[in-house]
Image (tube, coloured by chain):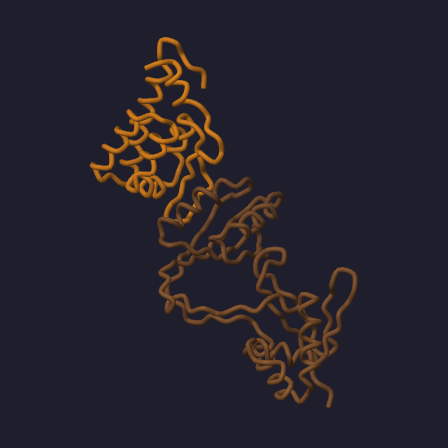
Amino acid sequence: MSHDTISKILRMVPREKAFYFFTSIGNYTGESASSLKEFMDKINGINVKSLEFHLYRGDFEKWVNEVLQDGELAVEVRKLQKFNLTGDALRNQLYVIVSRRFKRLTSNPSPIRV
Amino acid sequence: MKRKRQNFYIFPTVNNKFKQAPFLIERGEATLKLKNNTLILDDTDLEILEALQEDSRQTYMAIGKHLGIAHSTVYDRIKRMEKNGIIKKYTALIDAEKAGTKRITAIMTVFTDPKESEKVAETLSSALQVLEVYTSLSEELQIIAKVAADNQEHLHTFIANSVAPLPGVLRIRTSILTKKFKETQFTIVNNRKS
């Protein structure tokens, strides 16, 4: 993967492209993520209802693919839907997937500062 | 016999500061403060307004006959109230269900940073999906808005893409409205009967 591609995935996105966490239709938690790192950090603290809401609507997958432009991570997130996980089991698995990807991207031979 | 003094509101049909802000008019020596002058509304003006709120398509002649005054008086007073912005416009109340529009309506409560609330309310007021916007008195600063959308997905997309990202928005609570039991505007007629 090129340095440019990695930089693109790890960049901060503008406010209007950030991920806004909702718990149901129209109910915004007040939490948002503007980068992959922020997204990863929020997974552990956010209301688990929000994770369930967005995962099964395909919102995470869509944001990762269309905004962060990380197709590989989007596929991993989509696969998670098949396990029908809820609660902390879902939170833990999502964190494992995202943090593993983040680690891989940041431990590239030419490290990216985030 | 001296009439009891009453206060009542007239809802304009276009934006005041935010959407659907009311004017307060005092009954009796009714006054409406305008920018640099004061317009006095007497009982005849109020009765004309009441007649128009019941049916705005009736003629000056019909209103005059009903109130026992000349149609030219009705004409002059209506024109004066139109000129001074008391009568904002003449519109039609449409039954959306019968008109075949399958839209959903929701009440959205937006908790905001006090420094940004004015801007948030103004931005919401300019959105086509937003029908009404109010601020409310409570411990936290809230903006309450009525929103319409084609379906739940469109409603969520609007809130996620256009409301949540606004600077100063702290969180949002939304309730989708289901069954309507009553809908009316506060009118002079309502106030007289209460």
Indicate the position of residue A43 as horizontal and vertical percent values. 37, 33
**Residue B49 located left or right of residue A25:** right
Q: Judging from the image, what is the letter of the chain drawn in orange? A: A
Tell which residue pokes out farthest to the top in this image. A109
Q: Name the residue at 40% across, 29% down.
A: A41
Indicate the position of residue A105 as horizontal and vertical percent values. 35, 18
Q: Name the residue at 61% across, 78% down.
A: B50
Q: Judging from the image, what is the letter of the chain drawn in brown? A: B
Indicate the position of residue B192 as horizontal and vertical percent values. 60, 81
**Residue A55 located left or right of residue B120:** left
Tell which of B23 and B173 is nearer to you.
B23
Tell which residue pokes out farthest to the right in this image. B37
Indicate the position of residue A100 as horizontal and vertical percent values. 31, 22
Residue A69: which quarter of the image?
top left
Tell which of B48 and A50 is nearer to you.
B48
Q: Name the residue at 47% across, 53% down.
A: B129
Is B173 located above or below residue B164 in the figure? below
